[in-house]
Image (cartoon, helix red, strand yellow):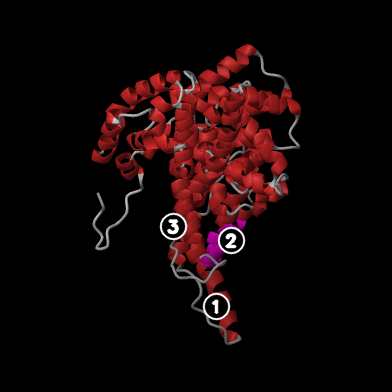
Amino acid sequence: MQERGGLDGADARKELEEFEAILLARLAAVGLPSDVLADVAQRGLVLASVPASVAELDEAALARGAYVSKLIAAAAVGLFDAALNYLWDATVGELRRRVAAYDLAYFFEVAVSSPERRKHLSRVEDLTRIDDIDLLRAARQLGLITHDAHLRLDHVRVMRNQASAAHPSVTTVTGSDLAQWLALAVRDVVAAPVDPVTARVGTLLADMRDHPLSIAERDAAAAFFHALPQDRVDALAAGLLGVYVDQEASQRSRDNVLTLWPALWPCVSEPRRHELGTKYTRLSAEHPERAVAARVILDCVDSAAYLPTSMRAAEIDTALDALLAAARAGTDASAAGRALRHLVSGGDDVPQQVIDRYTAALVELYVNGDDGLAAELLAALTPEQAGRALRAVASPPVAAALNQPPAQERWSRLLHDLEPRLGSHRNQALLQAIRTHPGSPATLAADPHIARLLAPRHRAKHGAAAL
C-alpha cells in the first residue's frame, strides 16, 4: 500500500492563501460577491485530517474515492456546503455498494413496506429509488451498519439537508465538522467490517437459494434465530415473507422459507407480527396472487389472529357460518373448526363486530355436545364476553337446543363455568334470574324479568344509565 501523507501545515496554508487571492481577485474583477468561501484556517483543518481519515482504506476503496477527492477539492477552495454534498454522496454510494454485495432482494423487502412499490425494485440501479433515510434504516436492520453508526450518519444526513449545496443553506459548516464527518463515514461505512450475525444471515440466505436445507441446517438455523437480537429477527421475518410471496423466487427458496418459518415465528415480536398481518391485507387488495402465498405462510403457524380487525371479523363470520352449517347437518366440522381456530387465539382478540355471534355460536355448539373447540374457546372468554355468552339464551338456535335434556344439563354446567367471570352486577342478576326461572331453559328469553335484563342498556333522558 502506498504511503499516504499531506502537506506541511504552514505550506498548505500558504498555498491556500495564494489560491484564494487569485480567485477572489477574479470574482471582484467581474463584480461578483467574494464573501462565499470558508476561512483558510478552517480549510486547513479539513486538509490536515485527510491522511488520518483515509489511513484505514485499502487500495480498492481508495480507487472508488472520487467523491472524497471532490470533497477535499471543494473544502480546499472553501466551498464547505459543496464538500458536504460530496461527502454524503460518497457515504450513500458506499452503503449501496454494501447492499448490492450482500443480498439485494432481502434489502428491498426490509426497506420497502408497500407491496406496490416493492414489485418495481429488483436491480442494483433501483437502489437510487430508495430514500436516504430508508437506506440508513434498512442498512441498520440488516446489520450493515451499527445502531450507533446509524445515529451518527443520520445526523450527517440532516446536516446535509440543511447546510449543503443541494439545499438552501440555513446552517454553517465548519472545518472541524467536515473533518469529523469524513472520519466517521470512513470508519462506520467504508472500512467497517461485516459483523458475524450479518454474515451468518447472508450465508443462510445464499444456502436457501442454493439447495434444499438439510435437517442439520434447519436445526442450526432454529438455534440461530433464538440467539438473534430482536430487530434482526423482525427484519428476517419481513425478508423471508417477501421471498415466499415473490413469484420470481425459485421453488427451492420458497420451500426452504416454509420449512424455517415455524422456527422463526416464536421469536418474532408482536408489533412485527401485526405488521405482517397488515401486509397480507395490502397484498389482498393490490396483488391477490401474492396474498395467497402470504396466507399459506401465516396459516402454517396459526397466525391469522394478527390480521387487521376488519378482515378478521369478516373471516371469523365466514368460519362461523361453515362451522355451524356442518354441526347442524351432522357432517364433519373439523375443517371449519380449524379455520376458526386459526383466526382466534382467545377471547381478547375477537373483533367487536362479531363478538355476539361468536359467543352465541360457541354456546350453541357446546350445549349440543361440542367438548372440543367450543369448550376450549368458551374457557378463554373475557369477563365482558362471558356476559355475552350468558345472553345467548336469546338466540333462537340456542333456545331450540335447550328443549332437549342433554343440552339442558350442559347449559347448567356452562353457567357454573361462566359464574366466576361474571363480574358486573347486571350479569350476576341475569345469572340469578336464569337459575331461578321456574320453566324450561328453552323459555328463558320469554320471561319478562329476564327479557329486561337481556335488553341493551339505554341512557335515561337526563343521561343517567337506566337500571
Q: Position of residue 194 (x, y in %)?
A: 55, 33
Amino acid type at mark 2? Ala
Name the N-terminal-most of marks 2 and 1: 1
Q: Position of residue 428 (x, y in %)?
A: 26, 35
Verify whether residue 254 appears in magenta. no
User: How far is disc 1 from disc 3 in space, using C-alphas?
Assistant: 24 Å
Amino acid type at mark 3? Asp
> Which disc, if any, is residue 73?
2
75 left or right of 378 in image? right
Dot in front, 2 or 1:
2
Q: Position of residue 336 (x, y in %)?
A: 60, 27
User: How far is disc 3 from disc 2 in space, using C-alphas?
Assistant: 16 Å
Which residue lies most toward the front here? 439
Residue beneath the point at 60% across and 23% down: 333
Say which residue label 3 marks. Answer: 177
Name the N-terminal-most of marks 3 and 2: 2
126 left or right of 2 in image? right
Q: Residues within 10 Å of mark 1 (few under 14, many from 20)?
A: some
Q: Are marks 1 and 3 in contact (CB under 8 Å)?
A: no
Determine the secondary structure under disc 2: helix
> Which disc, if any, is residue 24?
1
